[in-house]
Image (cartoon, rainbow, N blue to C red):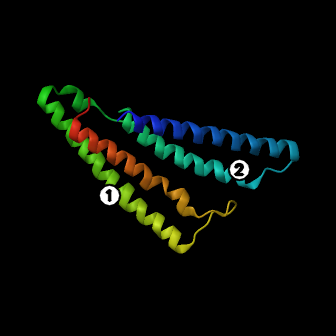
Amino acid sequence: MKTIPRLLGYICAFLLAVQVAVVLWGVLTRYAIGQQAGWTEELARYLLVWISLLGAAYAVANKSHVAISLLPDSLEGDKKIRIDRLIDALILLFAVVVMIIGGGYYVWLTFKLGQTAPSLTIPMGLVYLAVPLAGLFISYLQLNFLIHGRS
Protein backbone atom coordinates (compact mmCIF):
# COMPACT_ATOMS: atom_id res chain seq x y z
CA MET A 1 0.00 0.00 0.00
CA LYS A 2 2.89 2.37 0.66
CA THR A 3 4.18 2.06 -2.90
CA ILE A 4 1.21 3.83 -4.54
CA PRO A 5 1.53 7.03 -2.46
CA ARG A 6 5.30 7.00 -2.94
CA LEU A 7 4.91 6.52 -6.70
CA LEU A 8 2.36 9.34 -6.91
CA GLY A 9 4.65 11.60 -4.89
CA TYR A 10 7.59 10.94 -7.20
CA ILE A 11 5.49 11.48 -10.31
CA CYS A 12 4.10 14.78 -8.96
CA ALA A 13 7.58 15.94 -7.91
CA PHE A 14 8.99 15.10 -11.34
CA LEU A 15 6.13 16.87 -13.15
CA LEU A 16 6.56 19.91 -10.89
CA ALA A 17 10.30 20.04 -11.67
CA VAL A 18 9.52 19.88 -15.39
CA GLN A 19 6.92 22.61 -14.99
CA VAL A 20 9.39 24.87 -13.17
CA ALA A 21 11.96 24.33 -15.93
CA VAL A 22 9.37 25.06 -18.64
CA VAL A 23 8.18 28.26 -16.96
CA LEU A 24 11.77 29.35 -16.35
CA TRP A 25 12.57 28.76 -20.03
CA GLY A 26 9.52 30.81 -21.01
CA VAL A 27 10.61 33.72 -18.81
CA LEU A 28 14.20 33.55 -20.05
CA THR A 29 13.15 33.54 -23.69
CA ARG A 30 10.76 36.43 -23.11
CA TYR A 31 13.38 38.67 -21.51
CA ALA A 32 16.58 37.46 -23.18
CA ILE A 33 15.30 37.08 -26.74
CA GLY A 34 12.34 39.42 -26.53
CA GLN A 35 9.79 36.82 -27.58
CA GLN A 36 8.53 33.99 -25.39
CA ALA A 37 8.66 30.48 -26.75
CA GLY A 38 5.01 29.85 -27.60
CA TRP A 39 4.83 26.31 -26.32
CA THR A 40 5.97 27.05 -22.74
CA GLU A 41 2.73 28.58 -21.48
CA GLU A 42 0.64 25.79 -22.96
CA LEU A 43 2.85 23.00 -21.63
CA ALA A 44 2.94 24.61 -18.17
CA ARG A 45 -0.87 24.70 -18.17
CA TYR A 46 -1.15 21.02 -19.13
CA LEU A 47 1.43 20.01 -16.55
CA LEU A 48 -0.62 21.87 -13.93
CA VAL A 49 -3.64 19.74 -14.85
CA TRP A 50 -1.63 16.53 -14.41
CA ILE A 51 -0.03 17.70 -11.15
CA SER A 52 -3.41 18.75 -9.72
CA LEU A 53 -5.20 15.50 -10.53
CA LEU A 54 -2.39 13.16 -9.54
CA GLY A 55 -1.84 15.35 -6.47
CA ALA A 56 -5.48 14.78 -5.54
CA ALA A 57 -4.87 11.02 -5.73
CA TYR A 58 -1.75 11.51 -3.59
CA ALA A 59 -3.84 13.42 -1.03
CA VAL A 60 -6.39 10.58 -0.96
CA ALA A 61 -3.58 8.06 -0.44
CA ASN A 62 -2.30 10.01 2.55
CA LYS A 63 -5.79 10.81 3.84
CA SER A 64 -5.01 14.51 3.62
CA HIS A 65 -7.62 15.64 1.12
CA VAL A 66 -10.01 18.47 1.90
CA ALA A 67 -12.82 17.26 4.14
CA ILE A 68 -15.39 18.62 6.53
CA SER A 69 -14.82 16.43 9.55
CA LEU A 70 -17.31 17.95 11.98
CA LEU A 71 -19.69 14.95 11.95
CA PRO A 72 -17.10 12.13 11.80
CA ASP A 73 -15.03 13.72 14.57
CA SER A 74 -18.05 13.98 16.85
CA LEU A 75 -18.78 10.26 16.57
CA GLU A 76 -17.07 7.38 18.35
CA GLY A 77 -16.64 3.67 17.91
CA ASP A 78 -18.84 1.79 15.48
CA LYS A 79 -20.69 4.92 14.30
CA LYS A 80 -17.41 6.57 13.30
CA ILE A 81 -16.34 3.46 11.37
CA ARG A 82 -19.68 3.37 9.52
CA ILE A 83 -19.55 7.06 8.55
CA ASP A 84 -15.94 6.65 7.39
CA ARG A 85 -16.99 3.69 5.21
CA LEU A 86 -19.90 5.70 3.80
CA ILE A 87 -17.55 8.57 2.94
CA ASP A 88 -15.09 6.13 1.34
CA ALA A 89 -17.92 4.58 -0.70
CA LEU A 90 -19.11 8.01 -1.90
CA ILE A 91 -15.59 9.00 -2.93
CA LEU A 92 -15.23 5.66 -4.73
CA LEU A 93 -18.56 6.21 -6.51
CA PHE A 94 -17.48 9.68 -7.63
CA ALA A 95 -14.10 8.43 -8.83
CA VAL A 96 -15.63 5.59 -10.85
CA VAL A 97 -18.60 7.42 -12.36
CA VAL A 98 -17.22 10.88 -12.95
CA MET A 99 -13.48 10.40 -13.29
CA ILE A 100 -13.09 6.96 -14.85
CA ILE A 101 -16.28 6.61 -16.90
CA GLY A 102 -16.90 10.30 -17.67
CA GLY A 103 -13.23 11.16 -18.04
CA GLY A 104 -12.58 8.05 -20.11
CA TYR A 105 -15.43 8.96 -22.43
CA TYR A 106 -14.07 12.49 -22.80
CA VAL A 107 -10.58 11.15 -23.60
CA TRP A 108 -12.07 8.76 -26.18
CA LEU A 109 -14.12 11.58 -27.71
CA THR A 110 -11.17 13.96 -28.06
CA PHE A 111 -9.06 11.22 -29.66
CA LYS A 112 -11.92 10.35 -32.01
CA LEU A 113 -12.43 13.98 -33.03
CA GLY A 114 -8.70 14.46 -33.50
CA GLN A 115 -8.49 17.52 -31.25
CA THR A 116 -4.91 18.74 -30.85
CA ALA A 117 -3.23 21.38 -28.71
CA PRO A 118 -2.61 24.61 -30.64
CA SER A 119 1.10 25.14 -29.95
CA LEU A 120 2.31 21.66 -29.07
CA THR A 121 0.13 19.86 -31.66
CA ILE A 122 -0.20 16.86 -29.33
CA PRO A 123 -3.56 15.09 -29.02
CA MET A 124 -5.66 16.72 -26.31
CA GLY A 125 -6.67 13.23 -25.22
CA LEU A 126 -3.21 12.91 -23.68
CA VAL A 127 -3.88 15.96 -21.55
CA TYR A 128 -7.32 14.75 -20.49
CA LEU A 129 -5.97 11.25 -19.75
CA ALA A 130 -5.00 12.60 -16.32
CA VAL A 131 -8.67 12.48 -15.24
CA PRO A 132 -9.35 8.73 -15.68
CA LEU A 133 -5.81 7.86 -14.53
CA ALA A 134 -6.27 9.80 -11.29
CA GLY A 135 -9.71 8.19 -10.98
CA LEU A 136 -8.12 4.74 -11.23
CA PHE A 137 -5.63 5.58 -8.48
CA ILE A 138 -8.35 7.06 -6.25
CA SER A 139 -10.64 4.07 -6.86
CA TYR A 140 -7.90 1.60 -5.98
CA LEU A 141 -7.07 3.50 -2.79
CA GLN A 142 -10.71 3.87 -1.75
CA LEU A 143 -11.38 0.17 -2.38
CA ASN A 144 -8.40 -0.62 -0.20
CA PHE A 145 -9.78 1.65 2.55
CA LEU A 146 -13.19 -0.05 2.29
CA ILE A 147 -11.73 -3.55 2.48
CA HIS A 148 -8.96 -3.05 5.04
CA GLY A 149 -10.15 0.05 6.90
CA ARG A 150 -8.39 3.36 7.46
CA SER A 151 -5.45 2.28 9.58
The amino acid at mark 2 is Thr
- Classify mark 2: residues with Cα within 10 Å, few (<14), some (14-19) or many (20+): many
How far across and down, in percent of the image, does residue 35 sit? 83, 51
- Tell me the residue at 79%/50% (across/down): 36
> SS at mark 2?
helix
Point out residue 8 in the picture as x, y percentages from the top left corner.
47, 39
Image side of residue 55 versus residue 44, left or right: left
Q: Amino acid at mark 1?
A: Val
Reading the image, the residue beneath label 2 is 40
Task: Name which residue lies at 55% across and 57% down.
Answer: 127
Q: Return the x and y of residue 22 as percentages of the image width and height.
A: 70, 44
Quarter where residue 16 is shown: top right
Nearer to the camera, 83 or 122: 122
Q: For the view shown, which residue lies furthest in the bottom direction?
A: 113
- The crowd level at tag 1 (other Cα within 10 Å; few <14, some 14-19, many 20+) is some
Residue bearing mark 1: 97
